[in-house]
Image (spheres, rainbow, N blue to C red):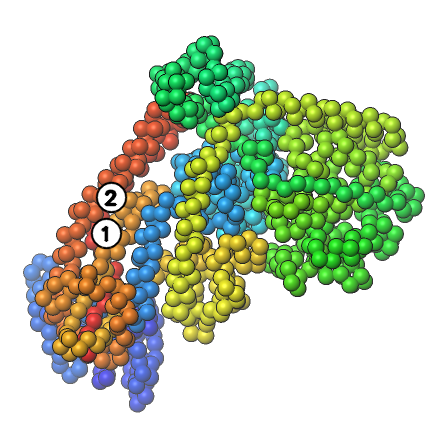
């Protein structure tokens, strides 16, 4: 290369610096200034990664003074290029290359090839593969539903699909405990955020659940929420933030924080939210005359949020008044009168009886019941045809579901309806009350449930019989995995250290004082069936959000007073899909509060061996005498209380069974639709394409990838990583798995799906950059003359539209490929893309640059022909996109309009959203243009 000061060059390794100007030359080095980037680079003369900028006659360029100059004359004098041309006003302009605009970025495929910049074939192949995969993801019917690290449970998948696709959903999630309301909410959030329906989310939970939600959202859904508390709020104010809540898109905070910090509450109200989630909403006390401060806080925030998800106890647990209070938060215009609501609900009880009759024997319906059904349905369904067997009973039930008063805003699944849960067997282990506790008064009262809190660590580890009992249990169940849960962090830490250090037990601790990474490692060590821990000793967070389904023995080192917490503990093992009986070991100290609580739980409500939805309500009913029994030494009174609780529970369960809302259960889980969705998700996941694609991605970007196991890889930054950055990677290696099954048992692995941030962001990184958009390769076909040229081009129909419109569902990134020769003949059908990949080889850079200079005219001709063919296809592509959008949205609009006539729960703003989405979506499609995404020049050698 001949270098002259003043020449313009482009850096092949840093094209975004713009046009560089040669400013200094010595015997071995050259220096370039890049005015647009205000940076300078020094290169070795012999190996400078530079390409000379040499425009040709007919090119349109900008100078520092004049824009849009069409070149008519180009010549070189003393190593400097001189240009002449006409500007937009047809006035003659003369200048040298030193006058060129430095901010020009030659990033389009055409510009890069004309300036002799091109990438290796693997980059081009990755780019085309990315476009193809984006196309499949955009049109996928399960888009937004495949990214969660969860089992595919039909009721969860159905609720997520049904709710998440709505505009600003406002619903009540009221599944029984253990059925995964948190997961359902997370799946809805993931869908809404992934598809652009929402971008700002506020989660409000009790103080004790903040950490659980943070971990659950990150580990299962890759959603990184920021915890807002007093400390963070004050720190942001000190930094000068006017509204700290506007600094985060995904915010998590406790209800207590908002209730007791008026300033923070006002800021949260003013911040504006697309979606708000409230957990434990049944604890928001409400009455018509005096709602609680907590209820008023949520009510005012709910008015400011577009969407609202309330996670709550079942209506049966909460009671009719409490249930109405929750619905009132969702839609105060619809649910404004408690007495009127109670009358509606009574009417639906009668309707439920008829649904049961229809399901069992349609012919059993009497004349009065037929008249009532006709009144419910209007003229939509001919009852007589259904009774005669001429029309499906399912059609009739579907119409009833559409009219169900709270059906559209309430989802409630029960264990009885879902089924698939294992048997639970309680094994009591009465142990003598040690003098350490009885003498110190720690055998009675609530304090006796965790008596070790009142003495030194050394004393209780030495004298509490539960410690030695745990060691003996582990020795007797050497081949089993055992989960131990304690109420207190200190208890879990002390017990684990004692067993590991002094008893030689393979154990791990799991508590809130550990970092997320440390907890994942502890869980992974416990999950390792060959070399892992036999026992995992947890604080109460061990019963929050983790799945230890591979274990079948649960030790309740102490008993919680809250029955819902007891069910959560058991629920770590008692899960859908668990194939073994769950053995629940209860070591309790005799003649004291621990024995009293065990007897009340087991022989009263019977909570160890079955899940009772109304457990908390039953507990509240007996709370006062139960607390008294824990403090008293009166076995007779205790047995009377237990007997009374058993009879009361039996009555509650009978009433619940008789009052089961059949319509609501049908609405909350459409098993056929759920199965169809799961099949489509499985179809995507069973394909090996993602792993192969990401291996190509790692290779191109210089990410080191080593095999961990069949479906897992260990990835880390390579020494020569392209751009110095890769999504999701820091300095430390991370382990990723492409297997959902493996991900569910290994919390320490990232579960890579098509919706994982690493995959999504790396695909965006490829498609939004110039990587692979220009390429030169050689082929060797003896039947073709040497020097034969082909141009492979890939186009897409592109438009700009807000993500929430989801225009890409109707106008996806569909690659349009051509392979033309110099005559303009398209050979793409004869030589498919994959075949050409296999035939082609990289070309030496200097050779490629020489070829590009020689075949400039032929290249222009082939590109012109390819572009014309792509433009010819555009009207048909846009027509199909318009038809798809109109059909899809018209169906939804017509359905909602029809439903609104018979069901007041349909909100007008939902209908308005779809009408606006249709109008804006059609306008975006009409504005689409053909864009060239990648060009590959093929030279036969």
Query: Residue 716's mark?
Result: none
Q: Nearer the viewer, residue 682 or 919?
A: 682
Q: Position of residue 516 (x, y in %)?
A: 60, 56
Q: Residues within 10 Å of mark 1 (few under 14, many from 20)?
A: many
Residue 4, by quadrant, is bottom left
Q: Position of residue 829 (x, y in %)?
A: 19, 60
Q: Nearer the viewer, residue 624 or 181?
A: 181
Q: Residue at x 60, y 21 (%)?
A: 658
Q: Position of residue 738 (x, y in %)?
A: 47, 58
Indicate which label's residue lies in the foreground, 2 or 1: 2
Q: Residue at x 70, y 26 (%)?
A: 649
Furthest residue toward bottom: 27
* Placement of the C terminus among the 4 image quadrants: bottom left
State whether residue 48 appears in this view: yes
State whether residue 21 appears in this view: no
Please tell me which of labels 2 and 1 falls first in the chain.
1
In this rendering, the answer to whether 619 lies above or below 758 is above
In this rendering, the answer to whether 100 lies above or below 247 is below
User: Would you say 118 lies left or right of 803 here?
Assistant: left
Q: Where is mark 1, residue-wise?
A: 797
Q: Residue at x 43, y 64 (%)?
A: 726
In this rendering, the answer to whether 687 lies above or below 157 is below
Residue 699, by quadrant, is bottom left
Query: Residue 881's mark?
Result: 2
Q: Position of residue 806 (x, y in %)?
A: 33, 44
User: Would you say 818 lies left or right of 238 here?
Assistant: left
Q: CA distance from mark 2 to mark 1?
A: 11 Å
Residue 61, by quadrant, is bottom left
Cβ atoms under marks 2 and 1 closer than 8 Å: yes
Q: Nearer the viewer, residue 296 or 630?
A: 630
Q: Residue at x 27, y 75 (%)?
A: 841
């Amino acid at each position: 290369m001949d270098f002259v000061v003043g020449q313009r060059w482009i850096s092949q390794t840093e094209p975004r610096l713009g046009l560089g100007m040669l400013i200094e030359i010595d015997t071995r080095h050259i220096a370039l200034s890049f005015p647009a980037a205000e940076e300078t680079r020094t290169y070795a003369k012999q190996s400078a990664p530079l390409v000379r900028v040499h425009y040709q006659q007919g090119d349109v360029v900008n100078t520092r003074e004049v824009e849009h100059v069409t070149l008519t004359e180009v010549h070189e004098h003393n190593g400097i290029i001189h240009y002449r041309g006409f500007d937009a006003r047809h006035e003659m302009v003369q200048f040298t290359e030193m006058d060129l605009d430095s901010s020009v970025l030659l990033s389009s495929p055409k510009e890069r090839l004309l300036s002799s910049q091109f990438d290796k074939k693997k980059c081009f192949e990755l780019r085309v593969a990315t476009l193809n995969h984006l196309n499949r993801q955009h049109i996928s019917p399960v888009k937004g539903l495949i990214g969660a690290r969860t089992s595919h449970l039909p009721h969860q998948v159905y609720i997520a699909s049904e709710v998440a696709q709505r505009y600003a959903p406002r619903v009540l999630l009221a599944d029984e405990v253990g059925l995964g309301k948190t997961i359902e909410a997370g799946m809805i959030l993931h869908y809404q955020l992934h598809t652009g329906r929402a971008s700002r989310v506020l989660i409000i939970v009790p103080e004790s659940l903040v950490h659980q939600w943070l971990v659950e959202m990150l580990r299962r859904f890759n959603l990184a929420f920021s915890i807002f508390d007093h400390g963070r709020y004050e720190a942001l104010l000190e930094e000068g933030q006017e509204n700290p809540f506007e600094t985060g898109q995904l915010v998590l905070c406790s209800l207590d924080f908002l209730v007791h910090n008026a300033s923070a509450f006002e800021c949260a109200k003013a911040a504006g939210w697309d979606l708000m989630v409230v957990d434990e909403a049944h604890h928001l006390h409400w009455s018509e005359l005096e709602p609680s401060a907590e209820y008023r806080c949520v009510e005012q925030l709910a008015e400011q949020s577009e969407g609202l998800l309330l996670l709550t106890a079942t209506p049966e647990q909460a009671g009719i008044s409490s249930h109405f209070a929750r619905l009132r938060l969702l839609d105060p215009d619809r649910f404004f009168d408690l007495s009127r609501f109670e009358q509606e609900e009574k009417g639906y009880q009668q309707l439920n009886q008829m649904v049961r009759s229809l399901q069992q024997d349609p012919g059993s319906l009497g004349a009065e019941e037929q008249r009532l059904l006709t009144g419910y349905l209007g003229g939509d369904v001919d009852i007589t045809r259904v009774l005669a067997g001429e029309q499906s009973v399912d059609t009739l039930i579907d119409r009833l579901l559409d009219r169900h008063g709270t059906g559209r805003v309430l989802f409630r699944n029960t264990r009885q309806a879902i089924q698939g849960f294992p048997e639970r067997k309680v094994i009591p282990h009465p142990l003598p009350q040690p003098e350490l506790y009885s003498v110190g008064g720690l055998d009675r009262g609530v304090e006796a449930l965790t008596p070790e809190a009142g003495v030194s660590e050394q004393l209780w580890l030495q004298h509490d019989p539960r410690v030695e009992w745990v060691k003996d249990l582990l020795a007797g169940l050497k081949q089993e995995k055992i989960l131990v849960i304690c109420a207190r962090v200190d208890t879990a830490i002390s017990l684990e250290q004692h067993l590991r250090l002094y008893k030689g037990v393979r154990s791990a601790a799991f508590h809130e004082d550990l970092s997320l990474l440390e907890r994942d490692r502890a869980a992974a060590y416990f999950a390792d069936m060959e070399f892992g821990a036999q026992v995992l000793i947890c604080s109460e967070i061990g019963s929050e959000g983790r799945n230890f389904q591979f274990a079948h023995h649960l030790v309740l080192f102490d008993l919680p007073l809250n029955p819902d917490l007891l069910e959560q503990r058991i629920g770590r093992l008692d899960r859908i899909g668990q194939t073994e009986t769950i053995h629940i070991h209860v070591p309790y100290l005799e003649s004291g509060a621990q024995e009293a609580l065990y007897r009340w739980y087991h022989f009263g409500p019977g909570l160890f061996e079955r899940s009772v939805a109304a457990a908390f309500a039953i507990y509240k009913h007996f709370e006062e005498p139960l607390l008294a029994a824990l403090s008293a030494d009166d076995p007779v009174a205790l047995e009377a209380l237990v007997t009374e609780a058993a009879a009361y529970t039996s009555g509650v369960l009978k009433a619940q069974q008789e009052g089961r809302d059949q319509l609501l259960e049908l609405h909350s889980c459409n098993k056929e639709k759920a199965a169809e969705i799961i099949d489509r998700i499985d179809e995507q996941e069973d394909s090996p394409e993602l792993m192969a694609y990401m291996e190509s991605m790692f290779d191109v970007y210089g990410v080191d990838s080593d095999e961990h196991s069949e479906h897992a890889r260990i990835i880390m930054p390579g020494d020569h990583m392209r751009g110095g950055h890769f999504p999701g990677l820091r300095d430390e290696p991370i382990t990723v798995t492409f297997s959902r099954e493996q991900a569910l048992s290994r919390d320490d692995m990232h579960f890579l799906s098509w919706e994982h941030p690493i995959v999504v962001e790396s695909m965006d990184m490829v498609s939004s950059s110039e990587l692979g958009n220009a390429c030169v390769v050689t082929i060797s076909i003896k039947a073709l003359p040497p020097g034969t040229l082909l141009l492979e081009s890939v186009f897409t129909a592109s438009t700009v539209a807000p993500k929430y419109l989801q225009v890409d569902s109707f106008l996806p990134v569909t690659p349009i490929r051509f392979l033309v020769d110099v005559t303009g003949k398209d050979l793409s059908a004869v030589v498919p893309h994959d075949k050409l990949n296999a035939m082609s080889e990289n070309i030496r850079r200097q050779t490629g640059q020489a070829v590009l200079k020689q075949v400039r005219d032929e290249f222009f001709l082939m590109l012109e022909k390819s572009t014309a063919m792509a433009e010819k296809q555009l009207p048909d592509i846009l027509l199909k996109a318009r038809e798809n959008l109109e059909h899809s949205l018209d169906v939804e609009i017509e359905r909602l309009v029809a439903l609104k006539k018979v069901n007041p729960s349909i909100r007008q703003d939902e209908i308005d959203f779809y009408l606006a989405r249709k109008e804006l979506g059609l306008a975006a499609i009409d504005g689409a243009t053909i864009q060239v995404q990648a060009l590959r020049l093929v030279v036969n050698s």
